[in-house]
Image (cartoon, rainbow, N blue to C red):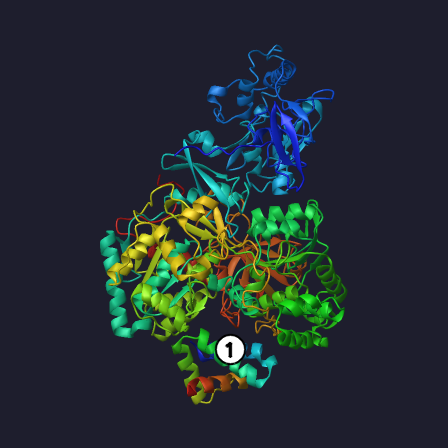
Amino acid sequence: MALIKEIDFGTPQRESAGIVMLEIDGRPVSVPAGTSIIRAAIQSGVNIPKLCSTDSLEAFGSCRLCLVEIDGRRGTPASCTTPVEPGMIVRTQSPKLAKLRRGVMELYISDHPLDCLTCPANGDCELQDMAGVVGLREVRYGYDGANHLSAQKDESNPYFTFDPSKCIVCSRCVRACEEVQGTFALTIEGRGFESKVSAGGKDFLESECVSCGACVQACPTATLMEKSVIAKGLAEHSVVTTCGYCGVGCSFKAEMQGNEVVRMVPYKNGQANEGHSCVKGRFAWGYATHKDRITKPMIRSRITDPWREVEWAEAIGYVAAEFKRIQARYGRGAVGGITSSRCTNEETFLVQKLVRAAFGNNNIDTCARVCHSPTGYGLKTTLGTSAGTQDFNSVDDTDVIVVIGANPTDGHPVFASRMKRRLRAGARLIVIDPRRIDLVRTPHVAADHHLQLRPGTNVAIINALAHVVVDEGLVDEAYVAERCEVADFALWRGFIAEKRNAPEATEAITGVPAAEVRAAARLYAKGGNAAIYYGLGVTEHSQGSTMVMGMANLAMATGNFGRRGVGVNPLRGQNNVQGSCDMGSFPHEYSGYRHVSDDATREIFERLWGVELEREPGLRISNMLDAAVDGTFKGLYIQGEDIAQSDPDIRHVTAGLAAMECVVVQDLFLTETASFAHVFLPGSSFLEKDGTFTNAERRINRVRKVTPPVGGLADWEITMALANACGYPMHYDHPAQIMDEIARVTPTFTGVSYDRLDKLGSVQWPCNDAAPSGTPIMHVDRFVRGRGRFMITAFVPTDERSSPRFPLLLTTGRILSQYNVGAQTRRTANVVWHKEDVLDIHPLDAENRGIRDGDLVSLASRKGETTLRAHLSERMQPGVVFTTFHFPDTAANLVTTEYADWATGCPEYKVTAVQVRATNHESEWQERYRAIKHETMRVEGGRIEGGNETIG
Amino acid sequence: MTPEKMVHMANQIAQFFAPYGREQAVAGIEDHLRKFWEPRMRAQITTYIASGGEGLHEFAAEAVGRLANK
């Protein structure tokens, strides 16, 4: 294996039907019109020296190294800012050019420390490379003149250092922050010799910087440098793999020294991220070697006992014996499993296979139950398949972007950057969210309409938007007639035209002025290509599935399906939410979303797996816990999920877990759920195994093992061992064979194989004979179900209402630097940005309660109470508060309720009636939690988690 | 599962299908319960109906009755 170095073509690629022919250094060259000379040259194998240009950024023309000569033109134009023209004759080398370039380099080096041998960029420095390329042998100006060599380092950011003494002021970092990330945190301060890169006059940590790493990536010197590289040196090989965080699915080069990761660098050829990253994927990978990692299997008879480390064989044998005992005593349906969206497709496929084939029931569910299960139900009902309709770069052709119940700059930062780029280029924006999320107003982006609705009124607002479309004659009648079920449309049209759905009627429900709704509806329907992007603010409601159908109705009525720039697109929370759903982890369906009662489908699996399969649906997570409390469900195998922190109404979750006789947790750390476990199996991080993740655009990306599993087995190997111990034989030598099996039984995956993924980089399902290279855009000529089906989406208010006792509404979610239950990000330096969960509250609500910023407050609902610090924020509307669920000792889900989506049971995290009051102590639950937490994690021999050292 | 939670879940399903009119709604509810509720849950709600079915939406009650009769 070698270090992967992508070619830098100097300027971005241009798309054009027109081809320009020219000559560079005597070679004929053909490129699309609009291409720069430097890119045309590099594409044809002619390298031109450069410093300020790089192909992720528009040309800048400041360094004067890429000068060329062009026949018929005076002077020596910069090849980065000069586009090709037909018949051009270009020379990249001449004595005159050599002299000019050497002169430029002399000036740069005269104000640069000559410490190459001890510089962290030694061997990876473009300035060093260019000095060699131009043949710099002396600096005639000497080194004693005015310079910047004594400029102080800024080491405030936990992940990278800013050393201005090495800066050549090429502006690549500033431009990366603007063009790639869209944050505009950096600038060039001062003029002339005083010019310097500045994070708005602050240090990096205090600035607007979001630590995406784009500036570090763009820096041609050691000015912006990863601290891990400064500490360890450069990598000797790299492996392309997929990030283990959100549903964007960014490709990274894991740059390695042996088995040790030196840095994660976003991969330019990654088809989801195209070389960009966020703070989590780029920097927050240190948890993989954190000392809290459990490396040995452990068992205990009772959850009050200390853990006992055992060998794999004993642990696996114990689980099999316990599950057999439980099934013999309580029945076949007394055990089940939960898969995780943090695990690979192959792993989730195996767990559901274990449950269906070895346990003999369908009690398999996945954490997508609590996030995007309504997406599956809603889109399958209306369109015919349970997935988003577009690829990410489709947004480049969108004229009107609608963001509903999502906060992309925090939850899906890399896609948010792409979205902001399109918005800066002129696309219009409608935001529908109770909070004023960053996208509403961020540098050079402002929403045309922010429909700041009350929590729990999504369906009323989507119906109001659709009402305007029907009421004002904005339906795309030809599209509907050609593509949709006529009778269902007629029924829907009658329903949506009713006065109760008019914006004037819904205003009292949603709090959004009717005129604003009408204006937004007109923009959506008449503004060109309109695309909806949505998140858990849509799904995590009692009407989550209804809302998904409402969005599909609106898009069908306006003809916004089946081409680039349009569609309805879920932004999936975790890395493999799409995949875990695709793989048949729901209790009612097999891979490819086929119901377990379908005889033909079941026969496919029965033939291949050699067992008779259950035709009745199994239990969902919440109902497994109900059944446990009822005494009919006693054994649970949980791969990579922490339901005791992430799922709603923690008391219900823990009561269910505590009622079971064998809870098996397979994870990286002793999680909250592990406190209720009898067996702990050490899982493997995304760096320690092979497999695939499927991102929000249905893109199947390879995950590649870069270091061995710290516990000795990859997760798929553990599941395989469990199946064999349970008496159901499973034999795979590599996850590629599991994918081959998935392809054999799943019509939308028949063309997927590791060979094809390696060849194409990634594919978007459906990938089969009809679409061997995958399907970027769904529903092009027809909907998957044939004709699109309009559904009636009557607004039904949630039963969770504010009251005099609980007058505020709580919504929960996540923020940029932390991830889900925080098990990973809490064990990284990301805690410098977010070290505890806080309660965002509007200043008016705070003032009414005598609460100041930073005060401890009690957050109480009818389900429970917790204490956390208040953060006064005008992002909130009065009457609404917000918190995150990243920290177990805050336990936000103590407060959330058992209410859930009517169709899928997805919890209603986004609406909980609460009261907030000042306090000076933790809640009773928190005090008890702190008292017993370490007790539940005791290991014979004394090892307990804590601290910040690494196991490496 | 507590009877309150079960009734709430069934009534939510009924409220979604109700605008389609009795016949279609009852068929929709029955289909939903059959496809998504595990047999233990279906048995529980069937027993609940037999003991009076207090608080259940009438369409839900009718759908459960049909489930029990098949």
The answer, for residue A465, to whether it is visible in the render is no
- Residue placed most toward the observer, B17 or A698: A698
Residue ID at (43%, 89%): B50
Q: What residue type is disc 1 on? A: His
- The reply to whether residue A359 is in sight is yes
The local crowd at label 1, few if under 14, some if 14 to 19, many if 20 or more residues have their Cα within 10 Å, is some
| Image point (65%, 14%), residue name | A96
Point out residue A182 in the picture as x, y percentages from the top left corner.
64, 43
Front residue of A307 and A400: A400
Residue drawn 45% across and 52% down?
A: A693
Vertical order, A803 against A190 (above or below): below
| Rendered position, A333 above or below A681 | below
Instruction: Indicate the quadrant where residue A21 lies.
Output: top right
Disc 1 is attached to a residue of which chain?
B
Is A409 placed left or right of A835 in the picture? right
Residue at the spot of label 1: B8
Q: Is residue A231 above or below residue A600?
A: above
Q: Is residue A873 left or right of residue A607?
A: right
Nearer-the-camera pick, A837 or A719? A719
Instruction: Identify the image quadrant of residue A741.
Output: bottom left
- Assign the N terminus of chain A to one quadrant of the image: top left
SS at badge 1: helix
Image quarter where the C terminus of chain A lies is top left
Tell me the quarter of the picture where residue A589 sits.
bottom left
Number of residue marks: 1
Q: Position of residue A174 (x, y in %)?
A: 63, 34
Q: Position of residue B37 (x, y in %)?
A: 44, 75
